[in-house]
Image: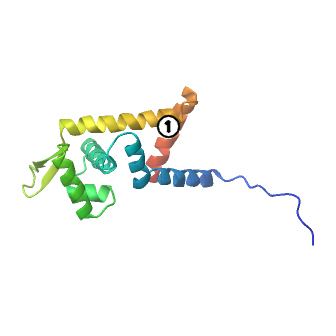
Amino acid sequence: MYKCMYTVVMTPSPEDAVERALVAIRRRQSRRVLAAGARRQGFSADLIATAEILDAIDDDAATGPERTVTGIAQRLRMDQPRASRLVAKTIADGLLERTADQRDGRRSLLTLTAAGHRQLDGIRANGRFQAGQAMADWTAGERDAFADLLTRFVSALD
């Protein structure tokens, strides 16, 4: 019986490396991890869910899909009752308001309030800060290339 003195090291394919990086990102972006990070920074753990709602409505306003509780539930891949509870809380916090749908009076559309816009701006500024920290030792060219490639990658996933 012979023992091998050499270890075969296989270089992962780019697809494998990207898949592993995406898994690591998902783990870091879990509600539990994000809530713990929010608490460390002095934010409410509820801010994560609020941020998702505000961001989805702001994005929907820019791209045109309907801004209803049902639309939010579908966009965030959550069940209708959970989306309804989160939207109700966000409305109670003064970050969203319901407006009558001019095309169908039976439905209500969700709109960010001025306070909602301010909250979302703060959340996004924090995200930009964290991204900047992660890329602090990168060159401007590396940052530009990464932004371009990541944007193209995410667009191609759809």
Label 1: which residue? 148
Residue 145 to residue 69: above or below: above
Residue 30 shows in the view = no
Q: Residue 106, how many percent across, how many down?
A: 8, 58
Dot 1 amino acid type: Asp
Between 115 and 74, the one nearer to me in the picture:
115
- Asked whether, in this view, residue 2 is left or right of residue 27, the answer is right
Between 64 and 115, the one nearer to me in the picture:
115
Q: Residue furthest left?
A: 105
Instruction: Report crowding for label 1: few under 14, some 14 to 19, many 20 or more residues within 10 A (C-alpha).
Output: few
Q: Quadrant of residue 141?
A: top right
Between 94 and 65, the one nearer to me in the picture:
94
How many marks the image carries: the answer is 1
Say what secondary structure mark 1 lies in: helix
Q: Residue 97, how many percent across, how many down?
A: 15, 46
Residue at (21, 59) in percent of width and height: 84
Residue at (37, 33) in percent of width and height: 125
Residue 94 shows in the view = yes
Between 20 and 89, the one nearer to me in the picture:
89
Q: Residue 101, how many percent across, how many down?
A: 11, 51
Residue 127 to residue 108: above or below: above
Q: Residue furthest bottom?
A: 1
Q: Residue furthest top?
A: 140
Residue at (16, 48) in percent of width and height: 92
- Colour style of the rendered protein structure: rainbow
For the N terminus, the image quarter is bottom right
Q: Residue 51, how many percent across, how many down?
A: 31, 46
Residue at (41, 38) in percent of width and height: 127
